Amino acid sequence: MDITAQQNLVHQTRDERRAIDFPKLSPAERDALIKKYHPDHRGHAYRSIKFGPNAGDSTVMEVATLLEGDSPIPADFNLTPEYSVDVLVVGGGGAGCAAALHAHAAGSNVLLATKLRLGDSNSVMAQGGMQIAVAPDDSPVQHFLDTLKGGHMKNDHDLLKTMVEEGPSIAQWLLELGVLFDRQADGNLHVKKGGGSSKARLLTCSDYTGLEIMRVLKDEVLNQKVPLLEFGAVIELLSDGAGTCTGAVLQDLDNKRHIVVAAKTVILATGGIGRLHIQGFPTSNHYGATGDALVLAYRMGVPLVQIDTFQYHPSGGVYPEQLVGALVTEGIRSEGGHLVNAHGERFVNELDTRDVVSSSIIRECEEGRGVRTASGRVGVWLDTPLLDVEHGPGTLDKHFPAMVRQYERYGVDIRKDPVLIYPTLHYQNGGVKIDVKGETPVGNLFVAGEASGGLHGRNRLMGNSLLDLMVFGKRTGLTAAERAKSLSQGKLTLTHVEQFREEAQRHQVSSELTSPMVLPAYTRHVS
Amino acid sequence: MANDSTTPQQFTEQASEIKPQMVTVEIEGKPFQVPAGVTLMKAMWYAGKEVLRGAGCLGGFCGACATYYRTKDDPKVKTCLACSMAVEEGMSFSFMPAFPARKAIYNLPELKDPKQDLFELYPEAPLCRNCNACTEACPQKIDVREGVWKAVFGDFKAVSDMFMDCVMCGMCTPVCIADIAPNLVAVYASRAQGVHFTEKPEGLAKRIKKIADGDYQEDWDRVLKLSDEELQNTTASIT
Ligand SMILES: Cc1cc2nc3c(=O)[nH]c(=O)nc-3n(C[C@H](O)[C@H](O)[C@H](O)COP(=O)(O)OP(=O)(O)OC[C@H]3O[C@@H](n4cnc5c(N)ncnc54)[C@H](O)[C@@H]3O)c2cc1C
Ligand code: SF4
Ligand code: SF4
Ligand code: FES
């Protein structure tokens, strides 16, 4: 059957489906579904880490291999610094910009180094919005409970409480910088309801929330003249030889030159792992999402938490081919869009948490109720035209201009036709262990944003990441700046790398591979 | 690498079951055979090119992949985002190099009269000659020329609405005969709109005060005392 014929079934069954209320699963049903179908539970994709702070813990092959990889820096490397700063911020996404701006404002001498251009990141792509408890019927405590439920009760309570309580003041900070959040008629912030949340809590800037925030933050970083090193990838950290972080080695990707930075404090804000294509999944992530902070911190001796759990966003593109893996905004489901299988049936409550919805889509496809494209991919329908039917013509244009455009480019009109989706690798639920200041167990080494772990438990709730970035970007920036005031620069050594190499040898791991990955190897070898 | 099935290569091509149909495209003036229907970005990788400057979000949001292209036999050179456009037979394309536009430096809260200050920060803005080249160059189909005029006439609200889709690719800038960087003018106007001309949300201020005053302390005390099991029950009713 061609795609159009299959789409017709979605049109034909629309009215029928509208009449049915699809219940959410009970906790027991959720658990059973996830255990059976969620990629986090595919044992063959996992192995235990051979050595280091998480020795014996299980994670996906792709991550384990990188963690055990060798440092690209030889032991006799010349560590004469080219920069000497109070705070080195690594990563130019939301967390990095927030950290750099706060540290700079606190009077620190900051260097912001980032792998691509400033702002080329996951943050710029966030469409769904940012969860902050601002509505009168809502509260930080309710936000806490919702997140806990989404995270299967495995969230770090202290980190989570910190995030939800500081949310409103972050909204204030962004407004003061000129971020234009959507408003209600009375001037208050407009809130939307996101999957897995009991209250409407998502602040949005149409469906360009991340783009708007990043446009503003980037502009402010430039206005404040924060020293910037674009195309500067951190490939190793430096320590004083006694377990404290003292700087980093960067590679200038334009000319491959190494740059040594002496830094009293280092903040890693390097984001997620999508480009590792865990278990062969396509991804919604940006080009540089290669999990570099995990590797860098691990070699320094910092444990990772919940590093066996990843978020596969329910709606990644499947057709047209150009959109494979690209994120299709969750907003469609939030506003009532149905998921429909090849038989024209709904099969899950679309507002259930991401892990539940993704698992149910994988179930439909594995049990033969998926829709196959001409290029051999499989997915289920997301009934986009339903939104215009339900809320009136123009709804998609008004609320989802980015998505309308995303498909229009390839000749698909989402107002007329449903789109095909399948889960896409989206987010690293766990990450580097931090405390409420964003500091790791290694002194003066901070981690903020997606690279850090613990806050989101085993499943991040929609819209919580943008808030996490800002709250912990700010906290790390301020703490690092304060710390740096009373510190003198420690000496620069590669002791931790030597120790790591010795340990690798002891465990008979001789990795051919050096890590971090920095960029995925997409270039075809033409011989 | 961990294992071969995870090498990202498979995502740069058509799904493997079908042998891809090939098309010929010209990249930076040189012909290459690439699979039909892939994005311009994937065509670059397929052609064996390393991409550093030019790739960013890969999702149509960051503007890193600003590209000039021309379709077969058409003299018109158009613009697109290479990560969000499909190749076709006979197409010719090149990335746009970074363009050294001047960004004005300002401290928004300190500005007294942002609509007037625009003329000091971006004195070239009112010299727009209405050629419309910027609008034609915009891959996001923003009416850029109109936006520049709205900014000049002080309608910052309109500017902020019009440029919400702007990915800062900068393709409107090299074409401007008046040396205006319309996207930078727009960022200034939008931010000024937010900082100076938008209501402060009262509800937010109240919420911040309540948190600072410790109004939620009782709730916290109650919730944080709960055992995991009790928490489970408390949250079970969340829908
Ligand atoms: C498509 C998409 C949509 C999303 N939508 C939402 C949403 O609606 N709401 C929400 O809350 N969350 C959303 N998320 C999640 C959220 O956007 C991310 O978790 C978040 O932006 C991560 O921010 P970050 O600052 O930690 O990392 P990023 O924004 O990814 O930034 C990391 C930066 O570090 C740089 N970097 C990486 N490695 C190195 C290195 N070795 N050296 C130097 N620099 C390096 C990168 O190039 C990048 O600039 C979405 C994510 C995606 C991918
Ligand atoms: S307005 Fe300019 S910078 Fe913005 S998207 Fe259009 S061409 Fe790109
Ligand atoms: S390109 Fe420059 S001169 Fe021409 S319409 Fe745009 S802003 Fe005006
Ligand atoms: S790479 Fe970001 S818009 Fe194309």
Image: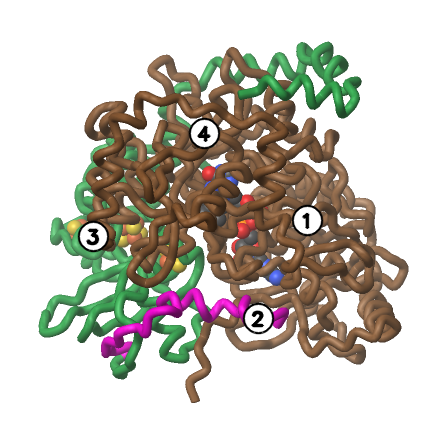
Q: Quadrant of residue A47?
A: bottom right
Read off the residue under disc 1. Answer: A431
Contact flag, marks 2 and 1 (Cβ < 8 Å): no
What amino acid is found at the position of numbered circle 1 in the picture? Gly
* Residue drawn where x is 58% and y is 51% of the image: A271
Read off the residue under disc 3. Answer: A411
Please tell me whether mark 3 or mark 1 is closer to you in this view: 3
Above or below, A220 relative to A238? above
Dot 1 or dot 4: first in sequence order is 4
* Residue drawn where x is 31% and y is 21% of the image: A19
Please tell me whether mark 2 or mark 1 is closer to you in this view: 1
- The answer as to whether the residues below labels 1 and 4 share one chain is yes
Kindly identify which chain the residue marked by label 1 belongs to: A
What amino acid is found at the position of numbered circle 2 in the picture? Asp
- Which color scheme is applied? by chain
Contact flag, marks 3 and 4 (Cβ < 8 Å): no
What amino acid is found at the position of numbered circle 3 in the picture? Gly
Tell me the magenta residue range: B1-28
